[in-house]
Amino acid sequence: MIFVTGGAGFIGSNFVLNWLKEETNSIINLDKLIYSGNLLNLKSLKNNPLHIFVQGDIQDRALIRKLLNQYKPQAIVHFAAETHVDRSIYDPTPFIQTNVIGTLHLLQETLDYWKNLNEHSKNHFRFLHVSTDEVYGSLRQQDEPFKETSRYAPNSPYSASKAASDHLVRAFHNTYGLPTLITHCSNNYGPFQFPEKLVPLMIINATQGKILPIYGDGLNIRNWLYVNEHYEALCLVLSKGKPGEHYNIGSETEITNMDLVHTICSILDDLKPNSPYVPHASLIQFIKDRPGHDRRYSIDCSKMRQELGWKPKENFKANFHKTIEWYLNNMTWVEKVMSGEYRKWIQLHYKETS
Ligand code: NAD
Ligand code: TYD
């Protein structure tokens, strides 16, 4: 049994779905179901006895204690978080509450649980904290990619809250010996991503003839990894990673936002040649930049390659194609997700342009 937090969100649900396809180990999935968490993502597991879903908050220590003692997991994979940089700029408070306090409470309960395990279980137990490359801050064009030894320099309230949670995880390893692992992954894309993030936002807006809002000059660079590749990397870290270590996970696909949006538009032009919005790129509009907008992320994954034998398989075009087709074929999911809360956010954030 493994204990997953945030398993109804984008990366968490892809993790749970992949895990239950491959593994015989069951999953207890704790998720508060905030706006980005969605049980529709897990619909295919409805009658699967290996998946136990519990709606609850990682800040709720009594609930975590009860679940740990009841299900006795051999690992925790911690995804639950507030994750959208733009929202963190409007209001950092929930980011501190969930990402920092929530992670602390999860660590405290995990430590109590872990201390009472027998020696064998204690040695094999792992707490995998899913963090981000954004804790390292921003790179200039001439800078080397982020390594695990890069200095922490978070720029947004989101990345600052993730950095704080990383430090707590590190402290629980160094102070109490809890066998923790921390991963820093780059931007993910794939099915089930909440459409406030760049990729699904652009796909959905383009199919509906809405503007494609690009912040600033559109030359910010991100490193993109297909979500299933992230899953494979996480499984390896969980089974072979060394307690106390950090692992960077990413791809070699570094692309400006502008080029990425053009790629999405040209794939849509091919997939929907009769759409009234062809060429979709004509919907692109530049809007006000995000404050503190990180210029470039780039990941050095040589530690993952050398120590764990992982490297991204990299088929950017094919994976993007697959991702776009998924959104086009899952319009019911899209419509349900674009409910009241989503509309409120879009109106608040893009009010001058929508
Ligand atoms: P997401 O926003 O899609 O999902 C987050 C999930 O956490 C949701 O299901 C939500 O309901 C749940 N949640 C939020 N607050 C909670 C709380 N207090 N208690 C319990 N559950 C709660 O996020 P995602 O994109 O799937 O990201 C998952 C993790 O991966 C995060 O920790 C994020 O920092 C990290 N990460 C994301 C990316 C990316 O590109 N999306 C890249 C690197 C790392
Ligand atoms: P996002 O998906 O929010 O991920 P992150 O900020 O964590 O990297 O944004 C990816 C990039 O796209 C980032 O440089 C900001 C940019 N962006 C836009 O240009 N327009 C948008 O409407 C959004 C949501 C993001």
Image (cartoon, helix red, strand yellow):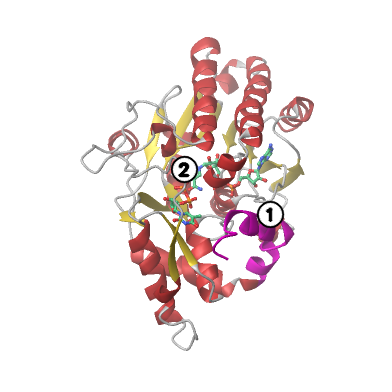
214 vs 79: above or below? below
Q: Quadrant location of the N terminus?
A: top right
Q: Secondary structure at mark 1?
A: loop
156 vs 336: above or below? above
Furthest toward the bottom, the residue is 274
237 vs 337: above or below? above
Residue 254 is situated, as x and y percent measured from the top left of the image, at: 31, 52
Give, as a single range, the part of the protein colored magenta.
332-354
Q: Is residue 269 left or right of residue 112?
A: left
- The answer to whether any part of residue 337 appears in the image is yes
Q: Amino acid at mark 2?
A: Pro
Q: Is residue 263 magenta?
A: no
- The answer to whether any part of residue 326 appears in the image is no
Residue 147 is situated, as x and y percent measured from the top left of the image, at: 31, 32
270 vs 155: above or below? below
Q: Which residue occupies 32% across, 26% down?
A: 149
Q: Quadrant location of the C terminus?
A: bottom right
Q: Which residue occupies 36% across, 68% down?
A: 263
Q: Nearer the viewer, residue 108 or 241?
A: 108
Q: Report crowding for label 2: few under 14, some 14 to 19, many 20 or more residues within 10 A (C-alpha).
A: few
Q: Is residue 136 left or right of residue 110?
A: left
Q: Earlier along the polypeptide chain: callout 2 or callout 1?
A: 1
Q: Amino acid at mark 1?
A: Asn
Residue 45 is situated, as x and y percent measured from the top left of the image, at: 68, 57
Q: CA distance from mark 2 to mark 1?
A: 29 Å
| Cβ of mark 1 under 8 A from ligand 1 | yes
Q: Nearer the viewer, residue 237 or 205?
A: 205
User: Which residue is under mark 1?
Assistant: 38
